[in-house]
Image (cartoon, rainbow, N blue to C red):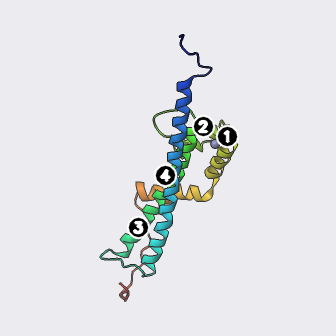
Amino acid sequence: MPAFTWPFDPLGATRGVERVEQARTYAVWAVWSVDAACYLCDLDNDVFNKVRPLGDFPPDTVDLAHARWAAGTAMTAIDLCGAAIGCLHFTAREKAYDIEELTRPNNRSTLQCGGCREWLEEVGSDDYYQDLLKNVRDRLTHRALGRHLFVTNVPDPDL
Ligand SMILES: [Zn+2]
C-alpha cells in the first residue's frame, strides 16, 4: 500500500488545535482572575465595614495588600486575554504574548480578526487601563507608593 497522501499538513492542523486549546486555557484563567477580583471586593468590603476582623494586622497593611492583589489580578486578567488573542492570531512562539505588545498600533493593525482588534484598540485607549498600568500596577510593584498621611493625637476607638 502506498503512503497516504494528505490533502493538507496534518501535523500543522494538530498544532492549530493545540493553539486553540492553549488560548482556551488562557481565557479560563482570565475568567477565574475576574472571579478572584470579585471575591476580593467582597472581602475588602467585609474587612473595612468591620464584618470581618483585621486580626493583628494594621489597617494600612491590609489596605495595601488588597490594593496590590486587585491591581495584579486586574492586570493578570487583561494579560491573559492578550495571551489568548496572541495564541489564536499571531505567530506561534514559546513566550506568551502580553497585552502591552499587542496594543501597540503596528501589532494590532495587522490583526485580521475584527473583534479582537477592536478589543485591543479599546484596551489600548482606555483611560482606566492606562491608569491601572501606570498609576497603580507600576507604582505598587516597581516603586514606593505615594501615600497621604493623616496624623492625629486622638486614638481611633475602633482600632
Ligand atoms: Zn479573534
Q: Nearer the viewer, mark 4 or mark 1?
A: 4
Q: Earlier in the sequence, mark 1 or mark 2?
A: 2
Figure check: 38 above or below 2:
below
* Ligand 1 has an atom within 8 Å of the beta carbon of the residue at disc 2: yes
Number of numbered labels in the structure image: 4
Dots 1, 2 in contact, CB < 8 A? yes
- In the image, what residue occupies the spot 52% across and 41% down? 21
* Quadrant field for ligand 1: top right
Give the percent coordinates (x, y) of residue 54. 35, 77
User: Under tag 2, what secondary structure?
Assistant: helix
Residue plotted at (61% across, 50% down): 124
Residue marked by disc 3: 64
Looking at the picture, how far across and down is residue 95, in whole percent?
46, 37
Q: Secondary structure at mark 4?
A: helix
Q: Is residue 126 above or below residue 44?
A: above
Cα distance in 3D space between marks 3 and 4: 24 Å
Q: CA distance from mark 1 to mark 2?
A: 8 Å
* For marks 3 and 4 on the same chain, the one whose residue lies earlier in the sequence: 4
Please name the residue that numbered disc 4 is placed on. 29
Residue ranking furthest to the left? 56
Q: Could you say where residue 20 lies in the image, as x and y percent from the top left?
A: 55, 39
Which of the two marks, 2 or 3, is nearer to us in this view?
A: 2
Q: What separation in Å lies between label 4 and label 2 (alpha carbons)?
A: 19 Å
Dot 1 beta carbon under 8 Å from ligand 1 = yes
Q: Is residue 67 left or right of residue 102?
A: left
For this orientation, the residue located farthest to the top is 2
